Amino acid sequence: MTKPPTRKLRCAIYTRKSSEEGLEQEFNSLDAQREACEAYVASQRSEGWVLVRDQYDDGGISGGTLDRPALRRLLAAIEEGLIDVVVVYKIDRLSRALMDFSKLVEVFDRNNVTFVSVTQSFNTTTSMGRLTLNILLSFAQFEREVTAERIRDKVRASRMKGIFMGGTPPYGYKPKDRKLVIDEEEAKNVRWIFARFLETGSTTQLAREVAKRGILTPRGNPVTKNFLYRMLINRAYIGEAVHKGQSYPGEHQRLIDQKTWERVRAILRESPRIRANHTRSQTPALLKGLLFGPDGAAFSPTHTRKVGRLYRYYVSQTVLKHGAGACPVARVPAAEIEAAVVERLRGMLRAPEAVIATWRAARPECERLSEDDVRQALTALDQLWAELFPAEQARIVQLLIERVDIGTQGLTIRFRDAGLTRLTAESGITSRRIRETAA
């Protein structure tokens, strides 16, 4: 009697290793798993087992997730009907989570695929095999959770001793020999940020000034308000280590003194809206006392709020006294009129005739002053205008401009004759002093 031909069962071997350590070796853990599985498949050749050519190896990937490249390829091949048996060295190589493994078994059952563990003999097509599998998986998951708890306890104990446990170090520090040491270049920026925040009380304004200085995050990204806020509340800067909201004395050196830290914390405890109003109140209106309407009446700075936003205006005194319609120009947006005046002012600083007039006016007071000295000073002021603090910008505008008249046809600016001369003298004649003013 002729023996019926044995049905071929296409076998796929899956291997996995959680860490990348040792993968660079010529014969690593993945190779050892595959060799054991290949020997097992060869021993079942009489049952029709044949090994498929494709290899499914995930190196350096945890078994706690199903998002693994080789596993995704294996499941795709199963769905296409290309695999009959999945062979692994141990069941935890396929998954360490009971719920994840249940999902994989559903895929295997739907496609009539058998799952085999070389070191733990069972068959998932039987109820006893399923029970054995679930018991083994439960222990595997238990082991994983105990290991995670052990790691968390170790991290907590280390943080309580102030030890740096890796990860991204705070801006201003760098890791060295598993400790935090001060990065002097970044530390200067950290101290300046804390000091400047004490002056402005605004992370919005501080973010703009940080951007002008060209300061970037450790990853090379622009510094945002959120990044600054996290810096200002980071207790690492006063030499502390934080774990789960609790602070402990750290091994590293502090960057910020306790007095500065407390003052910053006091400001941050205020409402953001209160701090914003305070910041605006410290910023003088650029054209206060300089802007006049077509009827000769002065314009006063004012503001209003709509849907939480602040809108600034200059309003005619005539309108304030006699009501709307008393002046052809009732009010103008502050940002637009100030931008137009500043553009005219900066254009004057670039004009050759302004350089010559300033040089001639200042020469009697400084015989060694050259025309090139004046040009460099005025050019530096023009280039650094945006970097000047608002109070300094307002002072320079008051120094250079005598009056701004606004009408229905536009605006007229009357400059002070001796304004540029005085400004040049105040700046120490050189562009270097102007740069110091901006800094």
Image (cartoon, rainbow, N blue to C red):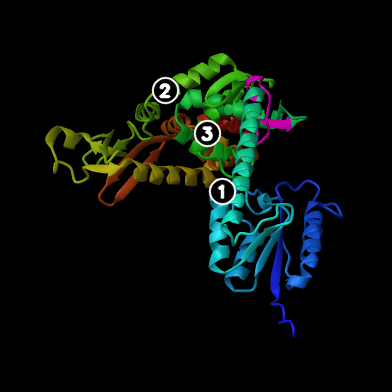
Secondary element under disc 2, as helix, strand or loop, is loop
Q: Residue at 45% of width from left, 26% of height from top?
A: 201
Q: Nearer the viewer, residue 12 or 387?
A: 12
- In this figure, which residue is indicated by the disc labeled 3? 228
**Residue 192 in view, yes or no:** yes
- In this figure, which residue is indicated by the disc labeled 2? 269
Q: Is residue 17 above or below residue 252?
A: below
Quick check: marks 1 and 3 in contact, CB under 8 Å? no
Q: Main secondary structure of the magenta part?
A: loop
Amino acid found under the numbered disc labelled 2: Arg
Instruction: Describe residue 406's horizontal placement relative to residue 10 as left or right.
Output: left
The outermost residue toward the right is 26
- In this figure, which residue is indicated by the disc labeled 1? 98
> Marks 1 and 3, how far apart in space?
43 Å
> Marks 2 and 3, how far apart in space?
15 Å
Q: Nearer the viewer, residue 11 or 323?
A: 11
Q: Residue at 65% of width from left, 54% of height from top?
A: 94
Residue 170 lies in the magenta-colored region: yes
Secondary element under disc 3, as helix, strand or loop, is helix
The outermost residue toward the bottom is 1
Amino acid found under the numbered disc labelled 1: Leu
Which is more N-terminal, label 2 or label 1? 1
Residue 313 falls in image quadrant: top left
Residue range highlighted in magenta:
159-175
Picture quarter with the C terminus: top right
